[in-house]
Amino acid sequence: MKKLLELLTEEVGSAFEKAGYKKEAGRVSVSNRPDLCEYQCNGAMALAKECKCAPKMIADAVVEVLKDSTVFESVEAVMPGFINMNISSDFLAKYVAEMAEDAKYGVELPKSKTIIVDYGGPNIAKALHVGHLRPAIIGESIKRILKYMGHNVIGDVHMGDWGKPMGLVMTEIQCRQPDLPYFDESYTGEYPKEPPFTVKDLEEIYPTASAKSKEDPDYNARALEATLKLQSGVRGYRALWEHIIDVSVNDMKRIYEKLHVDFDLWNGESTVQYLIPDMVREMKESGVAYESDGAIVIDVKKDTDTKEIPPCIVLKSDGASLYNTTDLATIKERVAKYDPAQMIYITDKRQDLYFEQVFRAAVKAGLVSDKVTLSHIGFGTMNGKDGKPFKTRDGGVMRLEDLIGDIQNEMYNKIKENKDIDDAEARQTADIVGLSALLYGDLSNQAVKDYIFDMERFISFEGNTGPYILYTIVRIKSIIVKYQAQGGNLSGLKIGVPVNNSEKDLMKALSSFSQVMEGAEAELAPHRICAFIYDLANALNSFYHETKILSEEDEVKKGEYIALINFTKDMLETCIDMLGFSAPDRM
Ligand code: ARG
Protein backbone atom coordinates (compact mmCIF):
# COMPACT_ATOMS: atom_id res chain seq x y z
CA MET A 1 0.00 0.00 0.00
CA LYS A 2 1.06 3.54 -0.57
CA LYS A 3 1.81 5.61 2.50
CA LEU A 4 -1.05 7.85 3.56
CA LEU A 5 1.08 10.99 3.13
CA GLU A 6 1.94 9.81 -0.37
CA LEU A 7 -1.74 9.56 -1.26
CA LEU A 8 -2.44 12.99 0.20
CA THR A 9 0.55 14.40 -1.64
CA GLU A 10 -0.68 12.92 -4.93
CA GLU A 11 -4.07 14.49 -4.41
CA VAL A 12 -2.68 17.93 -3.60
CA GLY A 13 0.00 17.63 -6.27
CA SER A 14 -2.56 17.04 -8.96
CA ALA A 15 -4.56 20.01 -7.66
CA PHE A 16 -1.46 22.17 -8.11
CA GLU A 17 -1.20 20.83 -11.65
CA LYS A 18 -4.85 21.52 -12.44
CA ALA A 19 -4.40 25.05 -11.15
CA GLY A 20 -1.51 25.49 -13.57
CA TYR A 21 1.46 24.88 -11.26
CA LYS A 22 3.96 22.07 -10.92
CA LYS A 23 2.75 19.09 -8.99
CA GLU A 24 5.98 18.75 -6.96
CA ALA A 25 4.76 21.70 -4.89
CA GLY A 26 2.01 19.51 -3.43
CA ARG A 27 4.04 17.83 -0.71
CA VAL A 28 1.84 17.19 2.33
CA SER A 29 3.09 16.73 5.86
CA VAL A 30 1.47 16.16 9.22
CA SER A 31 0.48 19.52 10.62
CA ASN A 32 2.79 21.15 13.11
CA ARG A 33 -0.26 23.03 14.39
CA PRO A 34 -2.70 20.24 15.21
CA ASP A 35 -4.94 22.83 16.80
CA LEU A 36 -5.51 24.35 13.35
CA CYS A 37 -5.55 21.36 11.02
CA GLU A 38 -4.43 17.75 10.57
CA TYR A 39 -2.22 18.09 7.51
CA GLN A 40 -0.54 20.94 5.76
CA CYS A 41 1.14 21.84 2.49
CA ASN A 42 3.64 24.69 2.28
CA GLY A 43 4.30 24.33 -1.45
CA ALA A 44 2.75 27.65 -2.44
CA MET A 45 5.38 29.51 -0.43
CA ALA A 46 8.32 28.15 -2.39
CA LEU A 47 6.46 28.42 -5.70
CA ALA A 48 5.66 32.05 -5.11
CA LYS A 49 9.35 32.94 -5.24
CA GLU A 50 9.72 31.15 -8.57
CA CYS A 51 6.59 32.65 -10.18
CA LYS A 52 7.01 36.00 -8.48
CA CYS A 53 3.45 36.14 -7.27
CA ALA A 54 1.68 36.08 -3.92
CA PRO A 55 1.71 32.68 -2.24
CA LYS A 56 -1.82 33.16 -0.97
CA MET A 57 -3.01 33.52 -4.56
CA ILE A 58 -1.52 30.15 -5.48
CA ALA A 59 -2.89 28.53 -2.34
CA ASP A 60 -6.36 29.93 -3.11
CA ALA A 61 -6.29 28.49 -6.61
CA VAL A 62 -5.24 25.06 -5.32
CA VAL A 63 -7.87 25.10 -2.60
CA GLU A 64 -10.50 25.90 -5.21
CA VAL A 65 -9.59 22.68 -7.06
CA LEU A 66 -9.50 20.66 -3.84
CA LYS A 67 -13.02 21.73 -2.86
CA ASP A 68 -14.43 18.70 -4.69
CA SER A 69 -11.85 16.25 -3.39
CA THR A 70 -13.17 13.19 -1.60
CA VAL A 71 -9.82 12.83 0.18
CA PHE A 72 -10.29 15.88 2.38
CA GLU A 73 -13.07 16.95 4.66
CA SER A 74 -11.93 20.56 4.61
CA VAL A 75 -9.24 22.55 2.87
CA GLU A 76 -8.31 26.11 3.59
CA ALA A 77 -5.74 28.61 2.38
CA VAL A 78 -4.41 30.82 5.14
CA MET A 79 -2.00 33.74 5.17
CA PRO A 80 0.68 33.99 4.03
CA GLY A 81 -0.02 30.99 1.78
CA PHE A 82 -0.26 27.76 3.73
CA ILE A 83 -2.81 25.14 2.81
CA ASN A 84 -4.44 23.56 5.86
CA MET A 85 -6.30 20.31 5.46
CA ASN A 86 -8.39 17.84 7.38
CA ILE A 87 -8.65 14.37 5.98
CA SER A 88 -12.00 12.88 5.07
CA SER A 89 -13.16 10.44 7.75
CA ASP A 90 -14.40 8.12 5.05
CA PHE A 91 -11.12 8.09 3.23
CA LEU A 92 -9.13 7.58 6.43
CA ALA A 93 -11.36 4.75 7.63
CA LYS A 94 -11.04 2.93 4.30
CA TYR A 95 -7.28 3.34 4.42
CA VAL A 96 -6.99 1.96 7.94
CA ALA A 97 -9.41 -0.88 7.20
CA GLU A 98 -7.26 -1.84 4.23
CA MET A 99 -4.13 -1.71 6.41
CA ALA A 100 -5.74 -4.05 8.91
CA GLU A 101 -6.37 -6.61 6.16
CA ASP A 102 -2.81 -6.39 4.83
CA ALA A 103 -0.29 -8.93 6.10
CA LYS A 104 2.29 -6.17 6.69
CA TYR A 105 -0.25 -3.55 7.80
CA GLY A 106 0.32 -1.58 4.63
CA VAL A 107 4.11 -1.51 4.57
CA GLU A 108 5.47 -1.96 1.07
CA LEU A 109 8.47 -4.19 1.46
CA PRO A 110 11.73 -3.11 -0.12
CA LYS A 111 13.79 -5.49 -2.23
CA SER A 112 14.96 -8.18 0.15
CA LYS A 113 18.66 -8.12 1.03
CA THR A 114 20.97 -10.31 3.07
CA ILE A 115 22.09 -8.31 6.08
CA ILE A 116 24.47 -9.33 8.85
CA VAL A 117 23.96 -7.75 12.22
CA ASP A 118 27.02 -8.04 14.44
CA TYR A 119 25.91 -7.38 18.00
CA GLY A 120 26.33 -8.55 21.56
CA GLY A 121 30.10 -8.83 21.33
CA PRO A 122 30.68 -10.35 24.77
CA ASN A 123 34.15 -11.37 25.85
CA ILE A 124 34.38 -14.97 26.95
CA ALA A 125 35.20 -15.90 30.54
CA LYS A 126 33.94 -12.66 32.02
CA ALA A 127 30.38 -12.63 33.30
CA LEU A 128 27.93 -10.54 31.28
CA HIS A 129 27.56 -7.17 32.97
CA VAL A 130 25.45 -4.05 32.45
CA GLY A 131 27.77 -2.95 29.66
CA HIS A 132 26.46 -5.87 27.63
CA LEU A 133 22.85 -4.73 27.82
CA ARG A 134 22.82 -2.11 25.09
CA PRO A 135 24.67 -3.96 22.31
CA ALA A 136 22.42 -6.96 22.86
CA ILE A 137 19.03 -5.30 22.92
CA ILE A 138 19.66 -2.58 20.34
CA GLY A 139 21.09 -5.18 17.96
CA GLU A 140 18.24 -7.57 18.58
CA SER A 141 15.69 -4.88 17.86
CA ILE A 142 17.44 -3.77 14.68
CA LYS A 143 17.56 -7.39 13.56
CA ARG A 144 13.84 -7.79 14.19
CA ILE A 145 13.00 -4.55 12.38
CA LEU A 146 14.95 -5.65 9.33
CA LYS A 147 13.29 -9.07 9.42
CA TYR A 148 9.89 -7.42 9.52
CA MET A 149 10.91 -5.51 6.42
CA GLY A 150 11.45 -8.83 4.68
CA HIS A 151 15.23 -9.04 4.74
CA ASN A 152 17.29 -12.14 5.24
CA VAL A 153 18.98 -11.13 8.48
CA ILE A 154 21.79 -13.03 10.14
CA GLY A 155 22.71 -12.14 13.70
CA ASP A 156 26.28 -12.86 14.78
CA VAL A 157 27.37 -12.52 18.40
CA HIS A 158 31.04 -12.02 17.46
CA MET A 159 32.55 -13.01 20.80
CA GLY A 160 35.94 -11.97 22.04
CA ASP A 161 37.26 -15.49 22.48
CA TRP A 162 40.85 -15.46 21.35
CA GLY A 163 42.94 -12.98 23.25
CA LYS A 164 44.91 -12.81 26.44
CA PRO A 165 41.91 -13.33 28.76
CA MET A 166 41.93 -16.92 27.50
CA GLY A 167 45.58 -17.31 28.45
CA LEU A 168 44.90 -15.82 31.86
CA VAL A 169 42.09 -18.23 32.61
CA MET A 170 44.15 -21.20 31.50
CA THR A 171 47.11 -20.12 33.61
CA GLU A 172 44.96 -19.83 36.68
CA ILE A 173 43.40 -23.24 36.04
CA GLN A 174 46.90 -24.67 35.77
CA CYS A 175 47.86 -23.11 39.11
CA ARG A 176 44.88 -24.75 40.76
CA GLN A 177 44.89 -28.09 38.98
CA PRO A 178 48.41 -28.61 37.63
CA ASP A 179 47.83 -32.33 37.03
CA LEU A 180 45.14 -31.92 34.40
CA PRO A 181 46.07 -33.67 31.16
CA TYR A 182 45.62 -30.46 29.14
CA PHE A 183 48.93 -29.18 30.42
CA ASP A 184 50.82 -32.39 29.81
CA GLU A 185 52.32 -32.01 26.37
CA SER A 186 53.24 -35.68 26.16
CA TYR A 187 49.60 -36.69 26.69
CA THR A 188 48.14 -38.32 23.56
CA GLY A 189 44.89 -39.78 24.88
CA GLU A 190 41.41 -38.29 24.69
CA TYR A 191 40.67 -35.34 26.93
CA PRO A 192 37.82 -35.52 29.44
CA LYS A 193 34.36 -34.62 28.16
CA GLU A 194 33.49 -32.80 31.37
CA PRO A 195 34.99 -29.36 31.94
CA PRO A 196 37.23 -29.11 35.01
CA PHE A 197 35.33 -26.04 36.27
CA THR A 198 31.82 -24.61 36.53
CA VAL A 199 30.60 -21.28 35.28
CA LYS A 200 30.73 -19.97 38.85
CA ASP A 201 34.40 -20.98 39.02
CA LEU A 202 35.08 -19.23 35.74
CA GLU A 203 33.51 -16.02 36.90
CA GLU A 204 35.89 -15.95 39.80
CA ILE A 205 38.93 -17.32 37.95
CA TYR A 206 39.17 -14.54 35.41
CA PRO A 207 39.26 -11.56 37.80
CA THR A 208 41.68 -13.43 40.06
CA ALA A 209 43.99 -14.19 37.16
CA SER A 210 43.75 -10.69 35.81
CA ALA A 211 44.68 -9.19 39.21
CA LYS A 212 47.57 -11.62 39.67
CA SER A 213 48.98 -10.84 36.24
CA LYS A 214 49.16 -7.18 37.13
CA GLU A 215 51.17 -7.85 40.25
CA ASP A 216 53.29 -10.74 39.17
CA PRO A 217 55.36 -10.34 35.96
CA ASP A 218 56.15 -14.02 35.97
CA TYR A 219 52.49 -14.96 36.08
CA ASN A 220 51.81 -12.48 33.31
CA ALA A 221 54.51 -14.05 31.17
CA ARG A 222 52.96 -17.47 31.69
CA ALA A 223 49.57 -16.12 30.65
CA LEU A 224 51.05 -14.71 27.46
CA GLU A 225 52.72 -18.01 26.78
CA ALA A 226 49.46 -19.88 27.32
CA THR A 227 47.73 -17.48 24.92
CA LEU A 228 50.39 -18.20 22.35
CA LYS A 229 50.07 -21.95 22.86
CA LEU A 230 46.34 -21.73 22.28
CA GLN A 231 46.79 -19.57 19.21
CA SER A 232 49.43 -21.85 17.72
CA GLY A 233 47.14 -24.83 18.17
CA VAL A 234 48.71 -26.82 21.02
CA ARG A 235 46.27 -29.69 21.45
CA GLY A 236 45.70 -29.60 25.21
CA TYR A 237 45.25 -25.83 25.29
CA ARG A 238 42.82 -26.04 22.44
CA ALA A 239 40.79 -28.69 24.30
CA LEU A 240 40.74 -26.71 27.51
CA TRP A 241 39.77 -23.57 25.60
CA GLU A 242 36.81 -25.44 24.10
CA HIS A 243 35.59 -26.19 27.60
CA ILE A 244 35.88 -22.52 28.50
CA ILE A 245 33.88 -21.56 25.41
CA ASP A 246 31.18 -24.18 26.02
CA VAL A 247 30.69 -23.30 29.64
CA SER A 248 30.64 -19.54 28.97
CA VAL A 249 28.41 -19.74 25.93
CA ASN A 250 25.85 -21.90 27.69
CA ASP A 251 25.64 -19.39 30.47
CA MET A 252 25.46 -16.44 28.08
CA LYS A 253 22.64 -18.11 26.18
CA ARG A 254 20.72 -18.46 29.41
CA ILE A 255 21.05 -14.77 30.20
CA TYR A 256 20.46 -13.54 26.66
CA GLU A 257 17.30 -15.62 26.63
CA LYS A 258 15.99 -13.59 29.55
CA LEU A 259 16.35 -10.54 27.30
CA HIS A 260 14.75 -12.32 24.33
CA VAL A 261 18.03 -11.96 22.49
CA ASP A 262 19.20 -14.76 20.26
CA PHE A 263 21.87 -15.18 17.64
CA ASP A 264 22.04 -17.17 14.45
CA LEU A 265 25.81 -17.40 14.60
CA TRP A 266 27.90 -17.95 17.70
CA ASN A 267 31.08 -16.95 15.94
CA GLY A 268 33.95 -15.12 17.50
CA GLU A 269 37.38 -13.78 16.89
CA SER A 270 38.68 -17.35 16.86
CA THR A 271 36.42 -18.32 13.95
CA VAL A 272 38.48 -16.56 11.31
CA GLN A 273 42.01 -17.13 12.54
CA TYR A 274 42.57 -19.59 9.68
CA LEU A 275 42.11 -16.77 7.16
CA ILE A 276 44.61 -14.36 8.66
CA PRO A 277 47.98 -15.52 7.28
CA ASP A 278 46.83 -15.51 3.64
CA MET A 279 44.88 -12.32 4.06
CA VAL A 280 47.87 -10.45 5.43
CA ARG A 281 50.18 -11.91 2.80
CA GLU A 282 47.85 -10.76 0.00
CA MET A 283 47.59 -7.31 1.52
CA LYS A 284 51.35 -7.01 1.57
CA GLU A 285 51.77 -8.41 -1.94
CA SER A 286 49.24 -6.01 -3.44
CA GLY A 287 50.98 -3.14 -1.69
CA VAL A 288 47.87 -1.95 0.24
CA ALA A 289 49.55 -2.87 3.48
CA TYR A 290 53.09 -1.86 4.32
CA GLU A 291 55.52 -1.99 7.20
CA SER A 292 55.70 0.93 9.57
CA ASP A 293 57.76 0.80 12.78
CA GLY A 294 57.72 -2.98 12.48
CA ALA A 295 53.92 -3.18 12.33
CA ILE A 296 51.90 -3.88 9.18
CA VAL A 297 49.46 -1.04 8.44
CA ILE A 298 47.01 0.21 5.82
CA ASP A 299 46.65 3.92 5.21
CA VAL A 300 43.01 4.88 5.32
CA LYS A 301 42.92 8.66 5.39
CA LYS A 302 41.13 10.55 2.64
CA ASP A 303 41.56 14.10 1.35
CA THR A 304 38.00 14.87 2.35
CA ASP A 305 38.58 13.99 6.01
CA THR A 306 37.98 16.76 8.46
CA LYS A 307 39.64 14.89 11.29
CA GLU A 308 42.75 12.79 11.54
CA ILE A 309 42.13 9.13 10.62
CA PRO A 310 45.21 7.13 11.62
CA PRO A 311 46.28 4.04 9.63
CA CYS A 312 44.61 0.71 10.36
CA ILE A 313 47.10 -1.64 12.01
CA VAL A 314 46.83 -5.12 10.57
CA LEU A 315 49.58 -6.86 12.53
CA LYS A 316 51.47 -5.70 15.59
CA SER A 317 55.23 -5.43 15.48
CA ASP A 318 55.57 -8.76 17.34
CA GLY A 319 53.55 -10.33 14.51
CA ALA A 320 50.51 -10.92 16.72
CA SER A 321 47.08 -10.34 15.25
CA LEU A 322 44.73 -7.97 17.00
CA TYR A 323 41.08 -6.88 17.15
CA ASN A 324 41.44 -5.15 13.75
CA THR A 325 42.92 -8.22 12.12
CA THR A 326 40.08 -10.47 13.13
CA ASP A 327 37.48 -7.91 12.09
CA LEU A 328 39.05 -7.65 8.64
CA ALA A 329 39.20 -11.42 8.32
CA THR A 330 35.60 -11.66 9.51
CA ILE A 331 34.51 -9.30 6.75
CA LYS A 332 36.33 -11.49 4.27
CA GLU A 333 34.63 -14.61 5.59
CA ARG A 334 31.16 -13.09 5.65
CA VAL A 335 31.48 -11.95 2.06
CA ALA A 336 32.53 -15.43 0.98
CA LYS A 337 29.88 -17.27 2.99
CA TYR A 338 26.84 -15.03 2.85
CA ASP A 339 27.44 -12.36 0.17
CA PRO A 340 25.64 -9.76 2.29
CA ALA A 341 24.45 -6.40 0.92
CA GLN A 342 25.02 -4.83 4.31
CA MET A 343 26.89 -5.45 7.56
CA ILE A 344 25.81 -3.60 10.66
CA TYR A 345 27.93 -3.41 13.81
CA ILE A 346 26.49 -2.40 17.15
CA THR A 347 29.00 -1.26 19.77
CA ASP A 348 29.73 1.53 22.15
CA LYS A 349 30.24 4.79 20.25
CA ARG A 350 33.82 4.95 21.48
CA GLN A 351 34.54 2.48 18.68
CA ASP A 352 33.38 4.93 15.97
CA LEU A 353 36.86 5.73 14.74
CA TYR A 354 37.93 2.11 14.97
CA PHE A 355 35.15 0.97 12.65
CA GLU A 356 35.78 3.83 10.24
CA GLN A 357 39.37 2.58 9.93
CA VAL A 358 38.38 -1.06 9.56
CA PHE A 359 35.69 -0.33 6.97
CA ARG A 360 38.02 1.78 4.88
CA ALA A 361 40.81 -0.77 5.13
CA ALA A 362 38.45 -3.58 4.12
CA VAL A 363 37.30 -1.74 1.01
CA LYS A 364 40.81 -0.59 0.13
CA ALA A 365 42.19 -4.11 0.46
CA GLY A 366 39.37 -5.43 -1.70
CA LEU A 367 37.96 -7.68 1.03
CA VAL A 368 34.55 -6.25 0.31
CA SER A 369 33.10 -4.28 -2.59
CA ASP A 370 32.25 -0.65 -2.00
CA LYS A 371 28.67 -1.56 -3.00
CA VAL A 372 28.27 -3.33 0.32
CA THR A 373 27.03 -0.99 3.03
CA LEU A 374 29.12 -1.13 6.19
CA SER A 375 27.38 0.59 9.08
CA HIS A 376 28.38 1.16 12.64
CA ILE A 377 25.74 2.05 15.22
CA GLY A 378 27.63 3.55 18.13
CA PHE A 379 25.52 3.80 21.25
CA GLY A 380 25.89 5.98 24.31
CA THR A 381 26.27 5.01 27.94
CA MET A 382 23.65 3.87 30.38
CA ASN A 383 24.22 6.12 33.38
CA GLY A 384 23.06 6.03 36.96
CA LYS A 385 21.08 8.86 38.52
CA ASP A 386 24.38 10.57 39.35
CA GLY A 387 25.03 10.91 35.62
CA LYS A 388 28.00 8.54 35.77
CA PRO A 389 28.13 5.06 34.21
CA PHE A 390 25.70 2.82 36.04
CA LYS A 391 27.17 0.96 39.02
CA THR A 392 25.97 -1.25 41.84
CA ARG A 393 25.22 0.40 45.16
CA ASP A 394 28.72 -0.28 46.42
CA GLY A 395 30.28 1.06 43.23
CA GLY A 396 31.00 -2.26 41.54
CA VAL A 397 30.14 -3.45 38.06
CA MET A 398 26.64 -4.83 38.04
CA ARG A 399 26.06 -8.21 36.48
CA LEU A 400 23.54 -8.18 33.70
CA GLU A 401 21.59 -10.98 35.31
CA ASP A 402 21.26 -8.97 38.52
CA LEU A 403 20.06 -5.92 36.65
CA ILE A 404 17.33 -7.95 34.95
CA GLY A 405 16.46 -9.61 38.26
CA ASP A 406 16.27 -6.29 40.11
CA ILE A 407 13.82 -4.70 37.72
CA GLN A 408 11.67 -7.83 37.65
CA ASN A 409 11.65 -7.91 41.46
CA GLU A 410 10.63 -4.26 41.70
CA MET A 411 7.84 -5.01 39.30
CA TYR A 412 6.79 -8.01 41.35
CA ASN A 413 6.54 -5.87 44.49
CA LYS A 414 4.54 -3.28 42.65
CA ILE A 415 2.10 -5.84 41.28
CA LYS A 416 1.67 -7.45 44.72
CA GLU A 417 1.02 -4.03 46.25
CA ASN A 418 -1.71 -3.17 43.77
CA LYS A 419 -3.48 -6.44 43.53
CA ASP A 420 -4.44 -9.53 45.40
CA ILE A 421 -2.90 -12.01 43.05
CA ASP A 422 -1.25 -15.36 43.57
CA ASP A 423 2.51 -15.50 43.74
CA ALA A 424 3.20 -17.58 40.68
CA GLU A 425 1.09 -15.40 38.44
CA ALA A 426 2.57 -12.23 39.93
CA ARG A 427 6.07 -13.56 39.22
CA GLN A 428 5.24 -14.48 35.67
CA THR A 429 3.63 -11.14 34.96
CA ALA A 430 6.45 -9.27 36.67
CA ASP A 431 9.01 -11.00 34.47
CA ILE A 432 7.19 -9.94 31.31
CA VAL A 433 6.40 -6.40 32.43
CA GLY A 434 9.81 -5.91 34.06
CA LEU A 435 11.51 -6.85 30.83
CA SER A 436 9.37 -4.36 28.93
CA ALA A 437 10.44 -1.67 31.41
CA LEU A 438 14.11 -2.43 30.85
CA LEU A 439 13.96 -2.73 27.06
CA TYR A 440 11.67 0.20 26.47
CA GLY A 441 13.57 2.40 28.91
CA ASP A 442 16.62 1.84 26.76
CA LEU A 443 15.25 1.61 23.24
CA SER A 444 13.01 4.66 23.50
CA ASN A 445 16.17 6.77 23.51
CA GLN A 446 18.04 7.49 20.33
CA ALA A 447 20.83 4.89 20.55
CA VAL A 448 23.69 7.37 20.23
CA LYS A 449 22.59 9.30 23.33
CA ASP A 450 23.51 8.50 26.91
CA TYR A 451 20.54 7.90 29.15
CA ILE A 452 19.80 7.51 32.81
CA PHE A 453 18.65 4.20 34.19
CA ASP A 454 15.76 5.33 36.33
CA MET A 455 14.08 2.32 37.86
CA GLU A 456 11.04 4.17 39.19
CA ARG A 457 10.33 5.89 35.93
CA PHE A 458 10.93 2.77 33.83
CA ILE A 459 8.53 0.61 35.80
CA SER A 460 5.79 3.23 35.98
CA PHE A 461 2.47 2.31 34.41
CA GLU A 462 2.07 5.90 33.28
CA GLY A 463 4.09 7.98 30.88
CA ASN A 464 6.43 6.95 28.11
CA THR A 465 7.29 3.49 29.45
CA GLY A 466 7.12 -0.15 28.49
CA PRO A 467 4.60 -0.99 31.24
CA TYR A 468 2.31 1.79 29.97
CA ILE A 469 2.33 0.24 26.50
CA LEU A 470 1.61 -3.19 27.97
CA TYR A 471 -1.10 -1.76 30.19
CA THR A 472 -2.76 -0.38 27.07
CA ILE A 473 -2.60 -3.75 25.32
CA VAL A 474 -3.98 -5.51 28.38
CA ARG A 475 -6.80 -2.96 28.55
CA ILE A 476 -7.77 -3.80 24.96
CA LYS A 477 -7.51 -7.51 25.62
CA SER A 478 -9.85 -7.22 28.55
CA ILE A 479 -12.44 -5.25 26.56
CA ILE A 480 -12.31 -7.90 23.88
CA VAL A 481 -12.77 -10.69 26.40
CA LYS A 482 -15.84 -8.89 27.76
CA TYR A 483 -17.17 -8.35 24.26
CA GLN A 484 -16.86 -12.05 23.59
CA ALA A 485 -18.50 -12.81 26.92
CA GLN A 486 -21.46 -10.68 25.78
CA GLY A 487 -21.74 -12.99 22.80
CA GLY A 488 -19.71 -10.85 20.39
CA ASN A 489 -17.66 -12.50 17.68
CA LEU A 490 -14.45 -10.99 16.31
CA SER A 491 -14.56 -12.61 12.92
CA GLY A 492 -16.06 -10.52 10.17
CA LEU A 493 -15.83 -7.24 12.10
CA LYS A 494 -14.85 -4.25 9.97
CA ILE A 495 -13.40 -0.89 10.88
CA GLY A 496 -15.99 1.81 10.14
CA VAL A 497 -16.13 5.55 9.57
CA PRO A 498 -15.11 7.38 12.78
CA VAL A 499 -17.91 9.12 14.62
CA ASN A 500 -15.88 11.29 16.97
CA ASN A 501 -12.52 13.01 17.06
CA SER A 502 -10.80 10.55 19.33
CA GLU A 503 -11.75 7.68 17.04
CA LYS A 504 -10.43 9.62 14.07
CA ASP A 505 -7.24 10.46 15.95
CA LEU A 506 -6.69 6.80 16.71
CA MET A 507 -7.01 6.01 13.02
CA LYS A 508 -4.59 8.77 12.13
CA ALA A 509 -2.11 7.40 14.64
CA LEU A 510 -2.40 3.92 13.11
CA SER A 511 -2.10 5.26 9.58
CA SER A 512 1.51 6.38 9.95
CA PHE A 513 2.88 2.87 10.49
CA SER A 514 4.46 2.42 7.06
CA GLN A 515 6.09 5.83 7.31
CA VAL A 516 7.49 4.91 10.71
CA MET A 517 8.83 1.56 9.52
CA GLU A 518 10.51 3.16 6.55
CA GLY A 519 12.28 5.57 8.90
CA ALA A 520 13.15 2.87 11.42
CA GLU A 521 14.73 0.79 8.69
CA ALA A 522 16.60 3.65 7.04
CA GLU A 523 17.99 4.96 10.30
CA LEU A 524 18.23 1.59 12.07
CA ALA A 525 16.29 3.26 14.82
CA PRO A 526 14.14 1.32 17.31
CA HIS A 527 13.32 4.58 19.09
CA ARG A 528 11.12 5.50 16.13
CA ILE A 529 8.92 2.53 16.89
CA CYS A 530 8.76 3.50 20.56
CA ALA A 531 7.62 7.01 19.64
CA PHE A 532 4.99 5.56 17.34
CA ILE A 533 3.53 3.17 19.91
CA TYR A 534 3.57 5.81 22.62
CA ASP A 535 1.42 8.07 20.41
CA LEU A 536 -0.72 5.12 19.48
CA ALA A 537 -1.23 4.07 23.10
CA ASN A 538 -2.16 7.66 24.01
CA ALA A 539 -4.64 7.81 21.15
CA LEU A 540 -6.14 4.49 22.20
CA ASN A 541 -6.54 5.60 25.81
CA SER A 542 -8.17 8.90 24.82
CA PHE A 543 -10.55 6.98 22.62
CA TYR A 544 -11.28 4.60 25.47
CA HIS A 545 -12.02 7.42 27.88
CA GLU A 546 -14.24 9.30 25.47
CA THR A 547 -16.19 6.43 24.03
CA LYS A 548 -18.64 3.99 25.52
CA ILE A 549 -17.45 0.93 23.73
CA LEU A 550 -19.11 -2.05 25.32
CA SER A 551 -22.31 -0.19 26.21
CA GLU A 552 -22.78 1.13 22.67
CA GLU A 553 -26.30 0.21 21.67
CA ASP A 554 -25.80 0.15 17.94
CA GLU A 555 -24.35 -3.33 17.46
CA VAL A 556 -22.79 -2.43 14.10
CA LYS A 557 -21.01 0.58 15.57
CA LYS A 558 -19.91 -1.45 18.56
CA GLY A 559 -18.45 -4.04 16.19
CA GLU A 560 -16.58 -1.27 14.38
CA TYR A 561 -15.12 -0.02 17.65
CA ILE A 562 -14.01 -3.50 18.54
CA ALA A 563 -12.46 -4.00 15.11
CA LEU A 564 -10.53 -0.77 15.55
CA ILE A 565 -9.18 -1.52 19.02
CA ASN A 566 -8.42 -5.07 18.03
CA PHE A 567 -6.34 -3.79 15.14
CA THR A 568 -4.64 -1.35 17.51
CA LYS A 569 -3.78 -4.27 19.77
CA ASP A 570 -2.34 -6.28 16.89
CA MET A 571 -0.33 -3.26 15.79
CA LEU A 572 1.03 -2.65 19.29
CA GLU A 573 1.94 -6.30 19.67
CA THR A 574 3.69 -6.36 16.31
CA CYS A 575 5.69 -3.32 17.35
CA ILE A 576 6.70 -4.54 20.79
CA ASP A 577 7.81 -7.78 19.21
CA MET A 578 10.23 -5.72 17.14
CA LEU A 579 11.50 -4.21 20.38
CA GLY A 580 11.95 -7.67 21.89
CA PHE A 581 9.13 -7.98 24.41
CA SER A 582 5.58 -9.22 24.63
CA ALA A 583 2.40 -8.51 26.57
CA PRO A 584 0.74 -10.58 29.29
CA ASP A 585 -2.99 -11.28 29.22
CA ARG A 586 -3.55 -9.55 32.52
CA MET A 587 -1.55 -7.28 34.75
N1 ARG B 1 34.18 -7.78 21.97
C1 ARG B 1 34.14 -6.43 21.54
C2 ARG B 1 34.26 -5.50 22.75
O1 ARG B 1 34.14 -5.94 23.86
C3 ARG B 1 32.91 -6.09 20.74
C4 ARG B 1 32.80 -6.82 19.42
C5 ARG B 1 32.03 -6.02 18.40
N2 ARG B 1 32.04 -6.61 17.10
C6 ARG B 1 33.07 -6.59 16.25
N3 ARG B 1 32.96 -7.22 15.12
N4 ARG B 1 34.17 -5.92 16.52
O2 ARG B 1 34.45 -4.32 22.57
Image: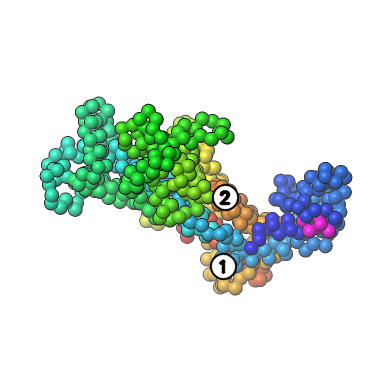
Residue drawn at x 12%, y 47% is 187
| Disc marking residue 273 | none
Q: Is residue 543 toward the left or the right of residue 185 in the image?
A: right
Residue labelled with disc 1? 483
The Cα–Cα distance between marks 1 and 2, rounded to whole angstroms, is 40 Å
Find residue 68 and report its image quarter. Answer: bottom right
Where the N terminus falls, by quadrant? bottom right
Prevailing secondary structure of the magenta residues: helix
Q: Position of residue 317 (x, y in %)?
A: 33, 31
Q: Nearer the viewer, residue 44 or 77?
A: 44
Which of pointers 1 and 2 indicates the residue nearer the eye? 2
Residue drawn at x 85%, y 55% is 20
Residue labelled with disc 2? 522
Region rendered in magenta: 13-18
Q: Is residue 78 toward the left or the right of residue 283 in the image?
A: right
For label 2, count other residues whose C-alpha is less than 10 Å away and answer few (under 14), some (14-19) or many (20+).
few
Q: Is residue 397 magenta?
A: no
Residue drawn at x 27%, y 33% is 210
Q: Is residue 17 magenta?
A: yes
The kind of residue on which mark 1 rests is Tyr
Q: Position of residue 420 (x, y in %)?
A: 43, 54
Total labels: the figure holds 2
Q: Nearer the viewer, residue 576 or 586?
A: 576
Q: Position of residue 287 (x, y in %)?
A: 43, 39
